[in-house]
Amino acid sequence: MFWTATAIFLVSYALIISEKIHKTKVALLGAALTLITKVLLQQEAFNDIDLGVDWNVIFLLISMMIIINIMTKTGIFQYVAIKCAKVAKGEPFRIMALFAIITAVGSAFLDNVTTVLLIAPVTLFIAEQLEINPIPYLITEVLASNIGGTATLIGDPPNIMIASKAGLNFMDFIYHLAPAVIIIFLLWMLAWKVVFGKRLQVREELKKRIMSLQERGQIKDSALLKKSLIVLSLTIIGFMLHGIFHYEPATIALMGATTLLFISGEEPHSILAEVEWPTIFFFIGLFIIIGGIVKVGLVADMSRAMIAVTNPQPENMTMLAMVMLWFSAICSAVVDNIPFVATMNPLLIDMVHKVYGVETGMATVEHIQHLAMMPVWWALALGACLGGNGSPIGASANVIVLGLSEKAGHKITFGQFFKYGLPVMLLTVFLSMIYLYVRYYLLKWY
Amino acid sequence: MNVSECMRTKLVLAKPDCDYKSLLCKIADPTPRQAYIVDKNYKLLGIVSARDLLKEIVPSYMDADLARSLTDDADFLQKQVEKVKHRCASDIMITKFVFLHPHHQLLEANTLIAERGFNTLPVLDAQGKILGEITRRDILVQLVNNCSLFNLDDKGPVDVSLL
């Protein structure tokens, strides 16, 4: 059983990285093999909290996709983007910075791919009006999307997975990660000002073109917009309070999604058809494959190796947090961060049990959320999300924007992306390292 | 009735190297809907429709909502035409097309048009040489003729600008 599960896991991982076959096909085949070989029983795959599919993650993703699908029909993003270009008075760097802010904030509450899909066409349009190269703008938005998505529980799938596994709530992410993201974003923008401030210049008459754009026509359905904003706001308030009322985030999101579906008047058939089912089934397949390697003890072996390397102590896991941050970032730059985090989660849980042991008398949740352990979870989240900026294939948003840009006649080469993405990844992960060290190990501000 | 009995034989033909602006002028004529791209033996290589030409000047990122934000679109359109003027028929044409042979029944043409939404279908001989085309309008005219519908009370099109 051990070698069967290990072989399924390694081959699936290799195929996902190679991108020769669609990752959903690979994950589902891997899951089917895990079940057919009885590495994992179907009962365990569907019902076991530790080994099986994490339905909290699945329903949170589906629900947020429903809310986003309805909301994007209103045209709010395009409206805000054109309005911002006018607020910037057509100044190229100001537009770049404002678009980066919109993308980062959007990505913190919506899905990263959706955010860049909405902002990229407006960016190409504005760049055309200003007669400037859109590539630095598009790359900036991708980077902003991956940075912004790090800030909240719902911002990026790795965070959803970490929150579900470690029992962390929305406010935990706001309290611990949002400050890091704000600092990182501001310092990155300062660096960007130095890089692009003087390079981006346009003639006055081109700025006037931007000022003549009409943003009002972008709102397609103002009644739906009001309903969507109310439901999204209530859902976010629900996320903020879910820890207090002991609801899982998926319950809050499902309530928001069904309410919006009900009051929007949209046909469920079309809205549900737009849910990214390949992504959902990718998660399901992955959870089952990982469940297999947890059951046969491969994860426990990996955890022993991690302990040997980082030597975590019950009261001090500084080395583990720092290694986890850089290891996650580098892996996420070359591998999809979703399977990476799906593997790291059970590994860390196993490691926590080994470090604290049963003799401490602490419950499992107390192990997982031990003060010394918390920075390790944040390191994993920061590394996995920010690492996506390290390469053109590091995150789904990167791949999407590269495709859109090429279609519009502005091919972004791997080299061009690396030129901007890699330094930003290194800078942001370095800043994260300082943040973690100063906050948790120097100031002891948990 | 066979297709050959009602097909049009006055067609817009162009060579594969015909440029965008020339194609635009050829198709901008009120009647033709598409240009047939042929080799020196009049073998059909591809088709360029009015829609294909219009699609060329719409950037991939543009949608109707974004277009609405422009207060003056004349300059934008002119720039887009300038951008694609170097493109030629072989870059734009579709090369996978449905066609009819002259001996095919009119009902087959009608069914293809009704089922697949085509406006116009080319008629080719066995070697792929273009012989004509059949349009929705041609089929409608045949229906009117065959069913003797001339005496119905129809005053034809109305110039609404005079209303």
Image (cartoon, coloured by chain):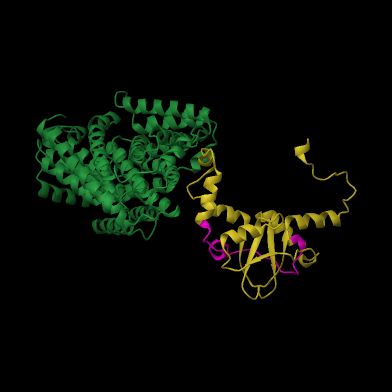
In this picture, residue A287 sits left or right of residue B121:
left
Q: Position of residue A406 (x, y in %)?
A: 42, 54
What residue span does the magenta drawing correspond to?
B84-107
> In this orientation, which residue lies closer to the viewer: A96 or A278?
A96
Instruction: Look at the image and tell me whether residue A55 can be seen.
Output: no
The quarter of the picture where residue A25 lies is bottom left
The quarter of the picture where residue A313 lies is top left
Q: Position of residue A251 (x, y in %)?
A: 38, 31
Q: Is B135 located above or below residue B45 in the figure? A: above
Q: Is A14 located above or below residue A186 in the figure? A: below
In this picture, residue B100 sits left or right of residue A365:
right
In this picture, residue A55 sits left or right of residue A298:
right
> In this orientation, which residue lies closer to the viewer: A375 or A92?
A92
Q: Is A242 located above or below residue B9 in the figure? A: above
The residue most toward the front is: A204
Q: Colour of chain A?
A: green
> In this orientation, which residue lies closer to the viewer: A431 or A322?
A431
Dominant secondary structure of the residues highlighted in magenta in the image: loop
Q: Colour of chain B?
A: yellow
Whether the magenta-drawn stretch holds residue A406 is answered as: no
Whether the magenta-drawn stretch holds residue B96 is answered as: yes
Q: Residue at x 66, y 75 (%)?
A: B127
Q: Position of residue A103 (x, y in %)?
A: 36, 38
Instruction: Look at the image and tell me whether residue B150 can be seen.
Output: yes
> In this orientation, which residue lies closer to the viewer: A382 or A220?
A220
In this picture, residue A379 sits left or right of residue A360:
right
The residue most toward the right is: B151
Q: Quadrant of the N terminus of chain A?
A: bottom left
Q: Residue at x 36, y 45 (%)?
A: A137
Q: Position of residue A99 (x, y in %)?
A: 36, 38
